[in-house]
Image (cartoon, helix red, strand yellow):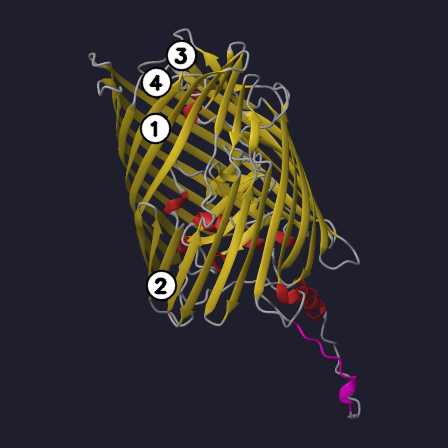
Amino acid sequence: MMSTLTSGICMPPVLLTFRLPLVLAALAAPVAAQTPPTATPARPPAQKVDEQDIQKVEIRGSTETYNPRRDDTATKIVVKGDEITKYGDTNVMEILKRLPGVSVGPRGIQMRGLGSGYTQFLLNGERPPIGFSTDQIHPDEIERIEIMRAASAEYSTQSIAGTINIIMKTNVRFKPKGGAQRSVSVGAGASKGGVSPYVGVSMSEPLGRFAYAVNANASRNVFERESHNMDEGYDAAGQLIRLRGTKVESRNESSSISATPRLTWTLENGENLTLLSSLHANRSKNRMHWETESTLGTPYTYRTVDSSSPSERRSMRTDFNWLHKLGAGAKLDLKAGVTYNSFRGDSRRLALAANGAPVQDDLTANESGETGFSSIGKYSTPIFEGHSLGAGWDLGFTGRDEDRFESIGRNGAAPVISDEIYRSEASRVAVYAQDEWNVTPRWSVYAGARWEGIQTISSGNTFDTSRSRTRVLSPLFHTLYKLPGIRGDQLRGALTRTYKAPATQSLIPRGYRSLNNSATVPDNLGNPDLRPELAYGLDLSYEHYWAPNALLSASVTAREIDDYTRNGLVLMPDGRWAIMPVNNGKAHVRSIELEAKFPVKALNPDAPAIELRANVARNWSWVDSVPGPHNRLDSQTPVTANFGLDYRTGPYSMGSSYTFANGGLVRVSTDQTRYQNVKRDLEAYVGWSRNKFSLRLALQNILAQDTIQDVTYTNKAGTTHR
C-alpha cells in the first residue's frame, strides 16, 4: 500500500482557444453579399413596432464547441491539460489508467489488450529514445494526450493496436495581464522499503515577444519486494521427480532529476519559433538475494545468489519548431531535433554452494552511447470547399555504440573474459499525404497513405555484420457519419494497414546467458533474419453523446497479422536452451469494447458533482501455427475493465478507481505454455485546495494482490513447471 501527499501552488487558469461555429460564417455571408442601392429610396412614415414582433437572434461561442473525439473524422481521443491535472496525479501512469481502451500493468501500456510493440508510444509525435521511461514526465509538463485507435498518415503506422501520443507544452502560458509565474510542488510516497519524495519547480515569464518557461523536478524511489518461485518436474507418467524452491528478496533504489526549458518567440506576422529541450539524469541500484532449497531430485548447483546492479543514465533532447503561415490559410510546420543518451551499468552476481564454495562469480560492465537527429515537416492547406490537404515527411537517424565486458568464473577456476563491442545504426524515411473531405454536413471521409522505410545495420567484434530493411506502404481510410434525426449519435469506420518492425536488440545475433539454464530459464538470442509483422485492420464504432460530457460508445476491431513474431525455444548444439524471436505465420485479433462516461447531474440536475466512468474490453486472438487450447498472442490480455468515480465540491475532491486485467494460460508454442497473472487494483484519493495551495493523499494497491506466474515446458520426457 502506498500513500502520497503533495502540496503545491496552483497555476492560473489556462486561456483556452476555441473555434467559432460555422454558423457565424453562414450568417455573415448574406450580409457581406448585400450591395448598397444606387438611389436612396424615400423613407417610409415612422411606425410603432410591437416588441413581440421583433425576432431576436442570439449567437453564442463556446470553448466546448469543438470536440476532437466527436468532430474529427479520424478516430482520436484528446485529453487536455486541465483534465490531466484535474485530479492531482503525480505520474503519467496514473493518468493513463483512466483513459478508455488503455490498460496499465506488469505487461506495460496496452491497447486492445496488446503491448510489446503493438501499442505505439510517442512523445511529441516521435518515438522516445531507448531506455526512456514515462517516469521522466510529470503531468504539469503535458499539453495534451492523444489516443488514436486507428492509424493516421501523419504518424508512424507501427501501431497495430493503436497509438498513445503525449504532447509536451511548447507555448508559454501566462496571466492575461502578463507577469511572471512561479510554482512549487512537493510530494512523498511510502511503501515497503522507505519513503519516496518528490519536488517540482515551475516558472515562466513573458518578455515582450519573447517568453520562457522551465519545469524541473527531482525524485527518489525506493521499493522492496519478496517473491517465491517453484521448479517442478514430472516424468512421462506424471510422477513428481523434482521439486525445488527459490525465495527472492529485492530492493530497488532510484534517484532522478529532469528539466524541460522552453523558449518561445512570437514574430510580427504571428508566427512562432519554439525551442524545447529535455534533460534527464538517473542513478539507480538494484540488489537481489536468492535462496534455493531442493526437496526432491537433483538440487541446484548453487544455494544462494547475491547480485548488485548500479547504473547511471543521462539523456538530452532539443527540438526546434517553426510554424510558418502562408497565404489562403496554408501553413508549414517544421521541426528539427537532436538527441543524446548515455548509459553505464555494472553488475556483480555471486552464486555459492551449500558449503559456501563459489559456484559462479560473474562481473559485467556495460557502457553505451546513442546519438540521433530527426527532421519532420508538414504542409497543410484548404484546397477547395470541404477539403483539407496535408503532406509531409519524417526523417531520422540513430547511431548506438555499446561496449559489454564480461568476466565469468565457475567453481573457483580462472574467469573467462569477453569484451564485446558493437554498433547499430537505424535510419528511417517516411513521406505521407492525407485529405479530409466533408462530403455533406453529416458525412466526412479521411483518406491517406504513408510510405515508411527503415534500415538497421548491426556490426560487432563477435558476430558478422547484419542488415535489415523494412519498407511498408500503408493506405488508410476513415469515415464518420452523424445519424439524421438523432442528435449526438454517430457511426465511425476505419480500414488500415499497419506493421510492427523488429526491435534493434532482437536483430543482433548475440546472446545473454541465464544462470541456471533450462527449458523454462533459457538464454536469449537475437535473430538478424527477423521480418516485420504486417497487419490489415478494420474498426467500427457507435457513439452516443447524450448530454454535456456524457458519452456511451461501443466498438469492434479486427486485425489480420502476417509474419507474426513469437519467441521460439530451441536446444542449441552446446546443449543449452535458448529463446529467439522467429516469424511464425498468421495471427488473428478481435476486440469488443464498451465505454460509458458521464456526470451524475446528466441524470438528475440536483445530484452531487460526481463523474462516473467505466470501460470494458474483451479481446480474442489465435495463431494458426500453434495448436489449442489456450492459443492466443502471448502478450494479449483477454479482458480489461476500469471503473471509477470522481467528486468535487468547493475546495475538496475525492475519487476512486478499480482496474481489472484478466490473465490465464497462454499456449506460446506446441511445447510451451505460460500463465499470466490476473490483476486487480484498487486506488483512492482525497484532495484539498485553497488559494494557491493544494494537498493530496492517495492510496494505491489497496488490495495488495500477489503476482503469480508460471512457465511450463512439455515434451516426451515429461513436464517442467517454473
Tell me where residue 595 appears, x and y as whole percent: 64, 50
The kind of residue on which mark 3 rests is: Arg
Magenta residues, start to end: 49-59
Write down the residue under mark 3. 576
Mark 3 or 2: in front is 3
Tell me where residue 393 appears, x and y as whole percent: 50, 37
Q: Which residue is depicted at the point 72% across and 71% down?
A: 34
Of the image marks 1 and 4, the number of the one nearer the N terminus: 4
- Mark 1 in CB contact with mark 2 (< 8 angstroms): no
The kind of residue on which mark 2 rests is: Gly
- Mark 3 in CB contact with mark 2 (< 8 angstroms): no
Q: Marks 3/2: CA distance?
A: 55 Å
Whether residue 595 is visible: yes
The kind of residue on which mark 1 rests is: Arg
Write down the residue under mark 4. 300
- Mark 4 in CB contact with mark 2 (< 8 angstroms): no
